[in-house]
Image (cartoon, rainbow, N blue to C red):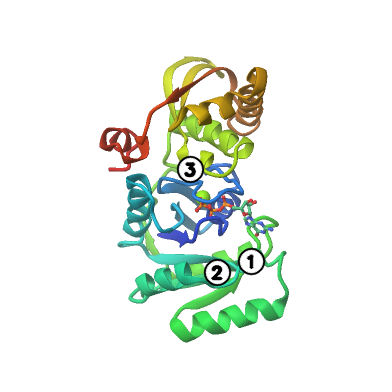
């Protein structure tokens, strides 16, 4: 019998949750960016070793929502902690504690198996982490505390070790070669969105959604027609860029990354469409599986 369990990773936007998920799984399952609110769905990544299978759940960063999309993202994050074996609160040690952290802490007060993980230790001095730990320990004295660098992979085995005591024996949730619950089409839209986030700034990353209009499959080759949805004409102009330069960069970067991580050759056509207030559209949120 193997030890198995579900572990949800929550935290503020940009804490490094998706970076950690990918590190734990050893594959790019969830997209990452230096912009906040990158992840919009609860995404599972499956960790395996000889004695354990852990289903990690990456979640949207909990933030003050500005549109229905944000409200749904928060709801998915909090919904993902129900009934799991362990909740990891991932904290960015390199940013000061703020109101948003206090809000999350308050929501996690009743969690029994709570692990507070201080991430990005590669960026900070030890005494800074000690001070943070002091604050969190005063608020949640029963939590377990660990520190790590998801980016560098430092102390990740220690994180796994501190989860294991909370797991119980049981049948596997997934076959041993499974890495994620999300399908290829979803991953492709996410790879495109990641590149959009990489090449845009300010409000654009938050205003963008990607949908696949047509997907043809031939062995390891995919022909994809996808739309990037934005909220304003001005955003469309920026996304396309002078002489189509930016959209071309997004297309090339996507193809390269899809080749590297999904081992697929893609031929990609990108269209940019303006759809005012799609982030408040019930139909769109339903389509994206967020309602
Ligand atoms: N230096 C350093 N940077 C990190 C570490 N972990 C993550 N990052 C960076 O932090 C940024 C945010 O990482 P993500 O994994 O997208 O953060 P997230 O918590 O999933 O963010 P949301 O999906 O927006 O909630 C990226 O630029 C990462 O490269 C770390 O351990 N050290
Ligand atoms: Mg994320």
| Circle nearer the N terminus (2, 1) | 2
Residue 220 can be seen, yes or no: yes
Q: Is residue 192 above or below residue 98?
A: above
**Judging from the image, what secondary structure is the residue with disc 2 in?**
strand
Crowdedness near tag 3: few (<14), some (14–19) or many (≥20) residues, C-alpha within 10 Å = some
Label 2 – label 1 distance at C-alpha: 7 Å
Residue that numbered label 1 is attached to = 148
Residue visible at 43% across and 33% down in the picture: 231
Residue closer to the observer: 210 or 246 = 246
Quarter of the figure with residue 251: top right
Q: Mark 3 or 1, which is nearer the eye? A: 3
Picture disc at residue 21: none
Vertical arrangement, residue 121 with respect to residue 286, above or below:
below
- For the residues bearing labels 3 and 1, Cβ distance under 8 angstroms: no
User: What residue does disc 3 label?
Assistant: 206
Asked if marks 2 and 1 touch (Cβ < 8 Å), the reply is: yes
């Amino acid at each position: 019998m193997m030890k198995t369990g579900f572990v949800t990773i929550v935290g503020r936007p940009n804490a490094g949750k998706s970076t950690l998920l990918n590190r734990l799984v050893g594959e790019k399952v969830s997209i990452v960016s230096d912009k906040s609110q990158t992840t919009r769905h609860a995404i599972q990544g499956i960790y395996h070793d000889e004695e354990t299978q852990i289903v990690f759940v990456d979640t949207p960063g909990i933030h003050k929502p500005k549109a229905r999309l944000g409200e749904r993202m928060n709801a998915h994050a909090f919904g993902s902690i129900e009934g799991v074996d362990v909740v990891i609160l991932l904290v960015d040690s390199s940013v000061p504690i703020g109101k948003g952290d206090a809000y999350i802490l308050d929501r996690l007060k009743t969690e029994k198996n709570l692990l507070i993980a201080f991430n990005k230790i590669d960026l900070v001095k030890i005494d800074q982490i000690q001070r943070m730990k002091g604050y969190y320990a005063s608020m949640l004295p029963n939590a377990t505390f660990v520190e790590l660098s998801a980016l560098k992979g430092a102390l990740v085995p220690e994180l796994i070790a501190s989860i294991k005591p909370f797991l119980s024996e049981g049948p596997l949730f997934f076959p041993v070669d499974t890495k994620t619950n999300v399908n290829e089409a979803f991953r492709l839209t996410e790879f495109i969105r990641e590149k959009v986030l990489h090449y845009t700034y300010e409000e654009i990353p938050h205003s963008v959604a990607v949908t696949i209009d047509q997907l043809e499959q031939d062995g390891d080759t995919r022909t994809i027609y996808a739309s990037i949805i934005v909220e304003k004409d001005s955003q469309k102009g920026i996304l396309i860029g002078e002489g189509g330069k930016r959209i071309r960069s997004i297309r090339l970067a996507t193809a390269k990354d899809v080749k590297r991580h999904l081992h697929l050759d893609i031929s990609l056509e990108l269209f940019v469409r303006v759809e005012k207030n799609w982030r408040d559209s019930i139909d769109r949120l339903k389509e994206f599986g967020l309602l």
